[in-house]
């Protein structure tokens, strides 16, 4: 019986994660279309919320949290984010395969956070 409830819980966590991810990607694409900046969809500094930010927002968040580590740069932000848009010149966008891999990584992260098996 416990296994059944874990599968049901996994189903709802996966559905919520996909909904949240699609919503944030849509928002990042909208901001990119308006501002022409590279937008990142990430969970910064071991937080709990998936947010959309640009480089300036990342720098402000680092300053706010008093993180002065030079290894935490905006290039690392792109590597650690779950999605990012192209830059001003429409270069460096994610391939469809990489987009799907990053979406699956976010779903797996949400399942781990919920302490559920990630093979569901």
Image (spheres, helix red, strand yellow):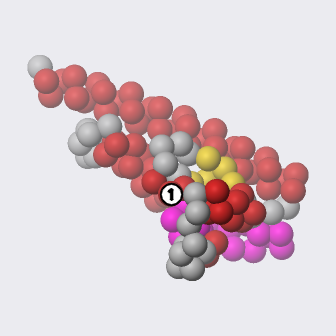
Q: Residue furthest bottom?
A: 70
Q: Is residue 22 visible?
A: yes
Q: Residue at x 58, y 57 (%)?
A: 65
Q: Residue at x 47, y 32 (%)?
A: 16
Residue beneath label 1, please? Answer: 45
Part of the protein shown in magenta: 77-96
Q: Position of residue 99 (x, y in %)?
A: 55, 59
**Left or right of 19 on screen, residue 74:** right
| Rendered-image quadrant of the C terminus | top left
Q: Residue at x 54, y 75 (%)?
A: 69
Instruction: Give the quarter of the image for residue 4.
Output: top left
Q: Residue furthest right?
A: 34
Q: Position of residue 21 (x, y in %)?
A: 56, 43
Q: Is residue 85 visible?
A: no
Q: Is residue 21 above or below residue 100?
A: above
**Does the magenta-highlighted stretch encompass residue 88?**
yes
**Does the magenta-highlighted stretch encompass residue 106?**
no
Q: Nearer the viewer, residue 73 or 41?
A: 73
Q: Main secondary structure of the magenta part?
A: loop
Q: Residue furthest left?
A: 1
Q: Secondary structure at mark 1?
A: helix
Q: Residue at x 35, y 30 (%)?
A: 11
Q: Position of residue 25 (x, y in %)?
A: 65, 47
| Rendered-image quadrant of the N terminus | top left
**Left or right of 112 on screen, residue 69:** right
């Amino acid at each position: 019986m416990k296994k059944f409830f874990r599968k049901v819980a996994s189903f709802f966590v996966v559905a919520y994660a996909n909904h949240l991810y699609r919503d944030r990607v849509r928002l990042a694409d909208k901001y990119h279309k308006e501002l022409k900046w590279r937008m990142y969809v990430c969970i910064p500094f071991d937080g709990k919320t998936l947010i959309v930010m640009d480089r300036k927002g990342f720098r402000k968040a680092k300053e706010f949290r008093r993180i002065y580590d030079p290894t935490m740069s905006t290039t690392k932000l792109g590597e650690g984010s779950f999605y990012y848009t192209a830059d001003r010149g429409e270069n460096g966008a994610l391939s469809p395969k990489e987009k799907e891999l990053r979406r699956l990584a976010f779903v797996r992260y949400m399942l781990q956070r919920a302490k559920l098996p990630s093979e569901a």
